[in-house]
Image (cartoon, rainbow, N blue to C red):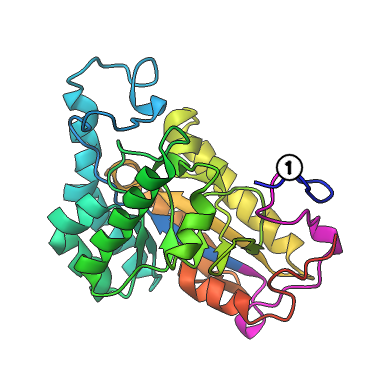
């Protein structure tokens, strides 16, 4: 990468752009706040293949059980067997469509889940091979290309079309990842939590946008990992939504929230998801949309692209 970089940044992928200097962003029908619910369907392997990068969050001391960690493996599987159907019921009750990061293994081995998402009009985006095979800068460029290509191809076989979006397992990336994603036809990436609006990512080929995800607010990060009491997590998400709604009076903002069926789909948690969605849909001027719907609209705005002002 070039070291001739612009003000404020130490890489070439996007511009320094403080939100107070941007032109106002308008969402459809005068909405103030766009909300994207990211419902993860990632397969958690019993044992990754030799040489795979298993993120350290999956191993001791973060994982309390030594290998074979059947407790964690089967707990994650709960999301595919039970939790996802509770989440679907909760979103159906409010007529809300989700965006589903789905890895290639899930797409190939859980066709009924693909069908259920498709039937609801949910958008499925690429999510790596499995959750215990992540991207790392230790990969060669050829290895990373094969990995990303296999992830996208796996979804294309299951869906009959190539996915438009990407969220890496554990948000994993190398310095090459955005360029490879754009080159392979991915139009937006959910891995960067640095903004409350979409933005254009500079790549040598292709057209790529960021759909920033609010990592701290997700069910796993906010409640499960940080051990916030469940009611406090719910209040935290509602508080963030309310503040962003007020801040969006003059220019539209985006709240992208990650949800995991193995976590939020538990019987004692699901009512809180229903309450959160109800809190959102009761507000006028809130647009609950899929990732592609948000990015497609953003691309059509006059300020979208490389024209952001420093």
Which secondary structure class fits the magenta region best?
A: loop
Which is nearer the eye, 133 or 25?
133
Q: Is residue 42 left or right of residue 167?
A: left
Split into 4 quadrants, where in the image is the C terminus? Answer: bottom right
Residue underneath mark 1: 10
Q: Is residue 115 left or right of residue 121?
A: left
Which is nearer the eye, 298 or 187?
187
Q: Residue at x 38, y 46 (%)?
A: 142
Picture quarter containing residue 22?
A: bottom right
Magenta residue span = 10-33
Q: Is residue 114 left or right of residue 205?
A: left
Q: Residue at x 36, y 58 (%)?
A: 126
18 inside magenta stretch: yes
Horizontal and vertical percent for residue 61?
38, 15
Q: Secondary structure at mark 1?
A: loop
Horizontal and vertical percent for residue 48?
22, 32
Horizontal and vertical percent for residue 260?
35, 47
């Amino acid at each position: 990468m070039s070291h001739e970089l612009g003000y404020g940044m130490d890489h070439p992928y996007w511009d320094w752009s403080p939100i107070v200097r941007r032109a106002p962003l308008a969402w459809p029908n005068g909405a103030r706040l766009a909300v994207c619910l990211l419902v993860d369907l990632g397969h958690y392997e019993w044992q990754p293949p030799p040489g795979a990068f298993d993120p350290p969050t999956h191993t001791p001391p973060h994982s309390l059980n030594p290998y074979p960690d059947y407790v964690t493996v089967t707990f994650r599987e709960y999301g595919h067997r039970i939790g996802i159907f509770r989440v679907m019921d909760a979103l159906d009750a409010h007529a809300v469509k989700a965006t589903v990061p789905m890895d290639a293994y899930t797409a190939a081995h859980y066709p009924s889940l693909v069908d259920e998402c498709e039937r609801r009009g949910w958008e499925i985006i690429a999510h790596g091979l499995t959750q215990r095979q992540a991207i790392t800068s230790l990969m060669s460029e050829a290895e990373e290309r094969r990995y990303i290509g296999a992830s996208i191809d796996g979804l294309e076989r299951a869906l009959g079309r190539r996915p438009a979006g990407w969220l890496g397992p554990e948000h994993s990336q190398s310095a090459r990842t955005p360029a490879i994603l754009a080159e392979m036809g991915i139009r937006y990436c959910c891995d960067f939590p640095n903004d409350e609006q979409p933005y254009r990512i500079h790549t040598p080929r292709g057209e790529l946008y960021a759909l920033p995800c609010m990592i701290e607010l997700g069910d796993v990060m906010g409640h499960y990992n940080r051990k916030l009491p469940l009611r406090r997590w719910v209040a935290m998400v509602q508080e963030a939504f309310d503040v962003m709604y007020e801040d969006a009076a003059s220019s539209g903002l985006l709240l992208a929230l990650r949800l995991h069926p193995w976590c939020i789909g538990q019987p004692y948690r699901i009512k809180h998801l229903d309450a959160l969605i109800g809190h959102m849909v009761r507000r006028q001027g809130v647009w609950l949309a899929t990732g592609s719907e948000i990015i497609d609209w953003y691309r059509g705005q006059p300020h979208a692209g490389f024209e952001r002002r420093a």
